[in-house]
Image: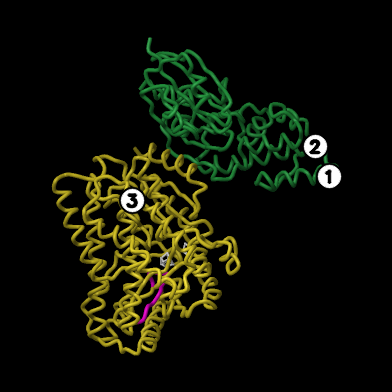
Chain colours: A green, B yellow
């Protein structure tokens, strides 16, 4: 049977969803690296697509990778909308916190009704957490758990990654419990995200996607702020590729 | 461009020649990528291409020739400065707003960092000695619109011969009286500078001349109601930009010729894009040459811009001065009334702008509004929120963008704009 693909080229990772007209066949993921085209080729090795839909920050690169004659590009906003609606048909809002940007999308069915996206600054994105995890010398995957051990939620005012680091370092120098500082940093992300969500209406149910949706501390703080737990798909970073693959079979 | 012939003129204007050469090279390349690469352009755009290619050349030569013949050159930064009076005094009226990131580091010695790019740019151009227009001016007219400009003019006055007109912030009777006294004062300033008396005949002729220019641009805007769009938004923006500094008589003629061609195109059912292409109305801060960043992104992403609700656009052309008046006092009143109709965000309240926006969206059959404000521009950033609200009631989607002249946010803007176009399609 003919194969269709959706590929999401983010700043940190590339996700590929392979499907036929009826169902998803496989999901793959790799790091973007400095040579995304080679990564794209590697990821799709041995696969012959009838049609491929590319999305994400590097969507324009796919055409140049020469892996499929029929390639269409759509934005992450549209792809996340399509993917979210398919996974959770009742979802009204999508929050995606990825490696380099954060998006809040209000849905009308599978269509985008309104969206907000962070501007050129990486504050409040996965990059922010990644950078600060390094400062704490903790693997990114464990940073959320680490923060959850904090008991006191500090107010970190700086939104900018660089200033937040300065603030964190000076708190450490004052002997503040590092878990509390980590908690404060997570909470600053959630605060920023909420502003964006409010601007699109933040209707529930809300689907939380993107790599940061793997972070237990962000999930907990978001749950507290929203008053109920967000819907989180099995592999939250796959929602964009999933939506792109759906677009491919249309 | 016959660079060598202009070289001497630029030297006489004391431009920084190597830097200026660099600027022209960048501008040329930019223009090539954004303009000359378009397909299905109208023949009449050749005039605009030519004028733009000679923006620092032949047009400056014309200004020098006018000066040699005893005419004065007036530079302006706002559509509030009555061009009719400038022309009636036998002077040349040019816009000095600039749309390139030039000399920002120098500009930041005169204005704070959180100043909009437009202000930084005109100061940067002056301090870096790169703008032959500014260097040609005998007098530069500022105006009390936004705080950014008001304070910038104080600093700018150390570098150029300046006069500041007081534009009110509201439109009550006393504001009108204030504005009228300023219009009269501007007339006196011009008469003193030029040594010419502004007679009733001269003013009447100037009113007609500027009205003709605005009528040609109104005609162009009306033709853009057609679907498929007969002209790209980029080209229309360029026309409005050139209107700010070109010779008004020649310009009007060329635009009317262009409009004839557009009419033929519409009659044949043709356009620059296929029928049904998403249509966006651009609204907000003025986009001065060579600020083509957003229109280029929009039109490379599968949409077309059908109107510019801005001062380099319909805000400058929508209203005409009544031609009925013949006495000096009545003509001044007509000018005062016409200029007070300008719906700039510096006014409060400024509900006219929202009404005008609604009309434009309907007339142009726009699928969405792209609101553009320059970063740090308080008036327009505020009205972006207001516009979102109005358009929400009208069920017209709005994408509000705040940016500057740099290119570092282009990728992100592309994603946002493409997503917006997907949304309105
Ligand atoms: S936006 Fe306002 S201040 Fe700027 S040129 Fe227009 S009228 Fe003048
Ligand atoms: S863009 Fe805004 S801040 Fe800049 S000069 Fe115009 S009104 Fe003032």
**In the rendered view, would you say B168 is above or below A6?**
below
Quarter holding the C terminus of chain A?
top left
**Label drawn at residue A54:** none
User: Which residue is tagged 3?
Assistant: B35
Q: Give how far apart the Cα atoms at labels 2 and 1 are.
A: 10 Å
Q: Which residue range is magenta in the image?
A: B72-80
In the rendered structure, does residue B39 fall within the stretch colored magenta?
no
Q: Which mark is residue A173?
A: 1
**Lateral position of residue A170 relative to residue B285, left or right:** right
The reply to the same-chain question for discs 2 and 1 is yes
Q: x%, y% of residue A166?
A: 74, 47
Residue sitting at 50 percent across and 33 percent down?
Answer: A93
Place of residue A131 in the rendered image (x, y in percent of width and height, measured from the top left): 68, 37
| Residue on which the image places disc 2 | A178
Instruction: Indicate which label's residue lies in the foreground, 1 or 3.
Output: 3
Q: Position of residue A186 (x, y in %)?
A: 69, 37
Query: Quick one: which residue is furthest to the front in this view?
Result: B4
């Amino acid at each position: 049977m003919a194969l269709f693909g959706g590929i999401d080229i983010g700043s940190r990772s590339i996700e590929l969803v392979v499907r036929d007209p009826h169902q998803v066949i496989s999901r793959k993921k790799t790091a973007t690296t400095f040579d995304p085209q080679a990564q794209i080729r590697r990821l799709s090795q041995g696969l012959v697509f009838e049609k491929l839909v590319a999305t994400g920050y590097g969507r324009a690169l796919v055409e140049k990778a020469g892996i499929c004659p029929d390639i269409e590009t759509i934005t992450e906003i549209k792809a996340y909308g399509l993917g979210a609606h398919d996974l959770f048909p009742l979802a009204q809002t999508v929050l995606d916190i990825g490696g380099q940007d954060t998006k809040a999308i209000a849905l009308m069915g599978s269509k985008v009704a309104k969206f907000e996206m962070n501007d050129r600054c990486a504050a409040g994105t996965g990059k922010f957490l990644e950078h600060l995890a390094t400062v704490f010398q903790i693997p990114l995957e464990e940073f959320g758990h680490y923060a959850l051990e904090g008991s006191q939620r500090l107010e970190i005012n700086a939104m900018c990654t660089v200033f937040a680091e300065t603030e964190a370092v000076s708190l450490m120098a004052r002997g503040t419990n590092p878990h509390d500082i980590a908690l404060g940093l997570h909470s600053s992300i959630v605060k920023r995200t909420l502003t964006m969500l409010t601007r699109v209406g933040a209707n529930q149910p809300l689907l939380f996607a993107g790599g940061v949706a793997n972070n237990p501390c962000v999930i907990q703080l978001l749950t507290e702020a929203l008053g109920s737990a967000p819907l989180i798909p099995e592999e939250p970073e796959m929602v964009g590729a999933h939506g792109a693959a759906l677009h491919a079979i249309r | 461009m016959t660079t060598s012939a202009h070289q001497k003129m630029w030297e006489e204007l004391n431009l920084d020649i190597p830097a200026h050469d660099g600027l022209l090279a960048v501008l040329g390349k930019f223009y090539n990528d954004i303009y000359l690469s378009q397909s299905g352009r109208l023949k009449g755009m050749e005039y605009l291409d030519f004028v733009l290619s000679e923006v620092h050349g032949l047009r400056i030569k014309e200004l020098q020739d006018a000066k040699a013949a005893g005419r004065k050159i007036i530079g302006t930064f706002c559509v509030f400065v009555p061009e009719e009076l400038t022309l009636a005094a036998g002077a040349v009226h040019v816009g000095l707003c600039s749309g390139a990131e030039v000399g920002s580091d120098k500009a930041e010695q005169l204005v704070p960092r959180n100043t909009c790019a437009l202000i930084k740019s005109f100061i940067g151009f002056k301090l870096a000695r790169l703008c032959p227009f500014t260097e040609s001016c005998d007098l530069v007219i500022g105006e009390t619109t936004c705080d950014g400009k008001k304070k910038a003019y104080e600093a700018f006055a150390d570098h150029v011969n300046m006069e500041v007109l007081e534009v009110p912030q509201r439109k009550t009777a006393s504001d009108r009286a204030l504005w009228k006294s300023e219009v009269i004062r501007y007339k006196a300033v011009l008469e003193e500078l030029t040594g010419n008396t502004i007679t009733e005949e001269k003013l009447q002729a100037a009113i007609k001349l500027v009205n003709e220019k605005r009528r040609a641009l109104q005609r162009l805007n009306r033709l853009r109601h057609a679907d498929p769009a007969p002209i790209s938004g980029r080209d229309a923006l360029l026309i409005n930009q050139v209107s700010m500094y070109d010779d008004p008589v020649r310009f009007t003629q060329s635009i009317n010729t262009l409009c004839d061609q557009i009419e033929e195109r519409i009659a044949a059912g043709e356009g620059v894009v296929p029928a049904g292409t998403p249509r966006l109305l651009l609204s907000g801060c003025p986009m001065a040459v060579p600020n083509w960043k957003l229109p280029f992104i929009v039109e490379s992403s599968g949409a077309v811009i059908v109107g510019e609700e801005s001062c380099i656009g319909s805000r400058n052309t929508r209203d005409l001065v009544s031609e009925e008046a013949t006495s000096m006092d009545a003509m001044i009143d007509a000018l005062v009334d016409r200029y007070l109709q300008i719906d700039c965000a510096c006014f409060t309240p400024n509900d006219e702008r929202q009404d005008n926006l609604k009309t434009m969206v309907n007339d142009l059959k726009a699928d969405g509004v792209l609101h553009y404000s320059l970063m740090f521009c308080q008036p327009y950033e505020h009205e972006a929120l207001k516009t979102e609200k109005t358009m929400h009631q009208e069920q017209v989607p709005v994408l509000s963008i705040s940016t500057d002249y740099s290119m570092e946010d282009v990728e992100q803007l592309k994603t946002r704009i493409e997503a917006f176009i997907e949304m309105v399609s």
